[in-house]
Amino acid sequence: MTMLSPFINKRLDGVIWRMEIDSLSDTIFLETRTDDRQVAFTSVNLNTGETNFENHTTAERWLTGIEAAYDGLLLLHNYQSENTPVHKGISAIDNAAQIIWSNYTYGFDHLTVNGPVVFNTQVQPKKLFLIDIKTGTMLRTYNPPIDVEIDNYIRFPQTTTPAQLNGPLTSDSYGNVAQYLHYNKFRIVSLHTLNNGQLQQRLFINDETATVYEDLLNTGIQKMQPESFILYKNLVIYIKNKSNLIVTPL
């Protein structure tokens, strides 16, 4: 029996607030936030495990975040104010954590196979157009028949009850919610258990005969934690203890 092991185990400063995967370059981007109101960004290559940049900060300490990622570039947005979730502007960051362009009148709409679709926030009614991710310049009007949404190759787990899952830990599970996903001969499962009165969240991977991987995701938590992992291509990706990025290949 071959046991699985993490390919990437990276601890970051602060809480991992958001992840975004660029399926063209197989790069994962992470947004972290700290108690002293500092937001930072990290880029990791999912093929090599190498870090492109880590804990990169911007001139705006707090009111900025990840918008999207495409072709190796990270798109960031600002917020109109601290009291509104409305996004403002777009900046593009390369793998050297350098801003290669910014446009403060753009609003992001969605990603397509041909690049990002945006709109000018100063023009009404809203008109969508395709931009060049490398320069931020407008290429043409958005054309739905050819500008189809890009496949991100991400699969999310399904929700069931522990009683419907046969395998380790299911008899000791707590609550009536479990998450699972099948990939080839593997089944990935996440559920909650109680240890000395403390609620824990665990993840394990079974092959056709036995458990080949297990990890404790969170302990001492106050409530059930949803969406504990994702599958990107053949990689199980999850956050451990709020600050650790774990990537395990199947």
Image (tube, helix red, strand yellow):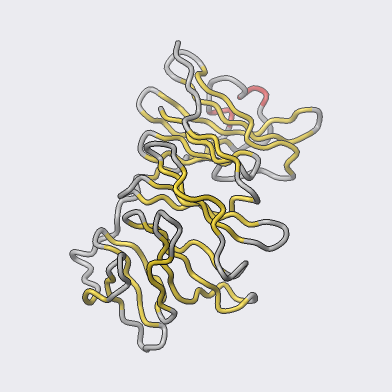
Q: Farthest residue in the left direction?
A: 146
Residue at the spot x=51%, y=51% of the render?
Answer: 42
Foreground residue among 158 and 24 = 24
Where in the figure is residue 128, as x and y percent of width and height? 30, 77
State which quarter of the image contains the C terminus: top left
Q: Is residue 167 above or below residue 56?
A: above
Residue at the spot x=30%, y=51% of the render?
Answer: 151
Where in the figure is residue 201, as x and y percent of width and height? 65, 35
Q: Farthest residue in the right direction?
A: 196
Foreground residue among 192 and 67 = 67
Q: Is residue 151 left or right of residue 198?
A: left
Q: Report how many numbered discs are placed on residues in the image.
A: 0
Q: Is residue 108 above or below residue 72?
A: below
Q: Is residue 5 left or right of residue 242?
A: left
Residue at the spot x=58%, y=30% of the render?
Answer: 162
Where in the figure is residue 174, as x and y percent of width and height? 69, 32
Locate residue 116: give its quadrant: bottom left
Where in the figure is residue 100, as x and y percent of width and height? 38, 67
